[in-house]
Image: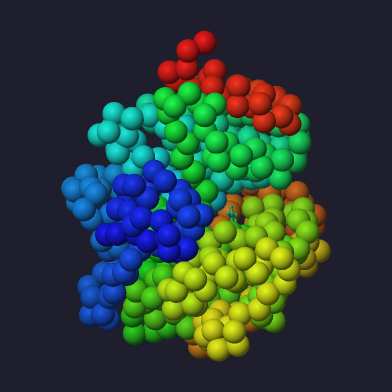
Amino acid sequence: MRYISTRGKAPALDFEEVLLTGLATDGGLYVPETLPRYTPEELMALRGLPYDELACRVMFPFVEGSIPESDFRAMVRETYAGFTHRAVAPMVQLDANEWVMELFRGPTLAFKDFALQLLGRLLDYFLEKRNQHVVILGATSGDTGSAAIEGCRHSSHVDIFILHPHERVSEVQRRQMTTVHSDNVHNIAVTGNFDDCQKMVKASFGDQSFLGGKTSLVAVNSINWARIMAQIVYYIYASLALGGPHRSLAFSVPTGNFGDIFAGYLAREMGLPIQQLVVATNQNDILHRFISQNQYEPGKLQHTLSPSMDITISSNFERLLFDLYGRDSSGVVDFLEAASHGAVQLEETRWQGARKLFDSFSVNDQRTCEVIGEVYGETGYLLDPHTAIGVESARRCRRDVTVPMVTMGTAHPAKFPEAVSRSGVGVEASLPDHLSDLLEREERFTVLNNDLAEIQDFMARNWKFAED
Ligand SMILES: *Cc1c(COP(=O)(O)O)cnc(C)c1O
């Protein structure tokens, strides 16, 4: 499979190169040159497969040419064997024709494990073959950091540095990162906010000379194509479990960077019958304003009870734009250029094209807590705040009650005790067994000033082959 950039000026790459690259050299994002497409008969043949086997079959065309099928299969098996539910992505029914797909049965209790558990293994595989070392650098306000650390903690070819804003992430989230004691894991608490952390990550990718030319940086946020790829699988799994391919489905997806829901869009492009995709956002609602009013304009960052969706710009939206422009990169470049100066609109016909599939809704903190309470009252099922936003948006935007609606359950409620407690349900979600002693484990992290030189110096001295 070949991958091309949404901005049209970077060379086409194969899967291995795309995995190790992140952003394209022209500033764009990589997308597959062509998508595999399924007929209904081919989808029928996938019904009833265990999750890991389905994952192999769906993903293999995307990696073909870079990795032999038997090696890939072994990696995928190992990835999903580490999930705590035998169905890997089980579904819970909330109401007639209404489900939550639990995507939080991986090691760090958020859907990001689906991709990052695999990504860590893929990186190690290719780096071993190349006898090469890389440094993963990322900033986190929540779930990405812990999922990336869990995904790479065993990799001998990777050092991972994660910046988090000092004293501004929840205790559970911080401890999921800082209690991992591997020599290649480096947690840095920055005396600044999340934006400060992200700025330093960006600056470091722009000029990597501080690493002395002996290693290079790799991005593990959702601009990395491998993350999108792994997320396509569970849309197909849900559909086949609920009557696909002969029955259409609707999905509601708690959305931040647009990575998860973009995978759903691709599943539909690949032939899966999906009638509707609901973009569910918190008060950071740029995508809701775009879908509902054709207005694209970044707002000011708001800190909410659903921190993993606190964004001002969704990087993966560019991948959808590329398709909305009929894969014409000059349209994408012009749109983004105009957006950097103020509010922009898409041509009416292109926007209408998106509206055929997408609906959207925005839910504030107060309503998020109410929904956690209401759903608990109706069913005894406890939602995390991100999933609650998904459920509310699903109910508000639903087009057809005869079409099954599946909300993506993106995190376990025990990760977000504050929202659960503010909902007034009077119960607490307990951490699953493998994390039950999390609050007693020893933490390791280094507090550094909000200063690029200080952080780069720390990295240069602490990666595996650094010379002190
Ligand atoms: C990352 C995350 C999201 C947002 O996913 P995107 O792919 O960035 O849209 C939603 N919920 C939770 C719990 C997350 O960790």
Please tell me which residue is depicted at 31% across the width and 69% down the height of the picture.
Answer: 34
Q: Quadrant of residue 426?
A: bottom right
Q: How is the image coloured?
A: rainbow
Query: Where does the image place residue 351, in percent across and percent down from the top left?
Result: 58, 83
Residue 353 in view in this figure: yes
Query: Where does the image place residue 316, in percent across and percent down from the top left?
Result: 53, 61
Please tell me which residue is depicted at 60% across the width and 22% down the height of the picture.
Answer: 458
Where is 454 relative to 372, above or below?
above
Of residue 83 and residue 17, the one placed in the foreground of this image is 17
Please tell me which residue is depicted at 51% across the width and 54% down the height of the picture.
Answer: 27
Of residue 305 and residue 139, the one placed in the foreground of this image is 139
Q: Quarter for ligand 1?
A: bottom right
Count the numbered circles shown: 0
Residue at the top extreme of this rendering: 468
Left/right of residue 441 with respect to residue 264 in the rendered view: right
Please tell me which residue is depicted at 33% across the width and 66% down the height of the picture.
Answer: 33
Query: Where does the image place residue 342, in percent across and percent down from the top left?
Result: 73, 68
Q: Quadrant of residue 31?
A: bottom left
Where is 432 relative to 10, above or below?
above
Where is 97 relative to 64, above or below?
below
Of residue 340 and residue 77, the one placed in the foreground of this image is 340
Quarter the N terminus occupies? bottom left
Query: Where does the image place residue 172, in percent across and percent down from the top left?
Result: 66, 39
Left/right of residue 43 with respect to residue 151 in the rendered view: left
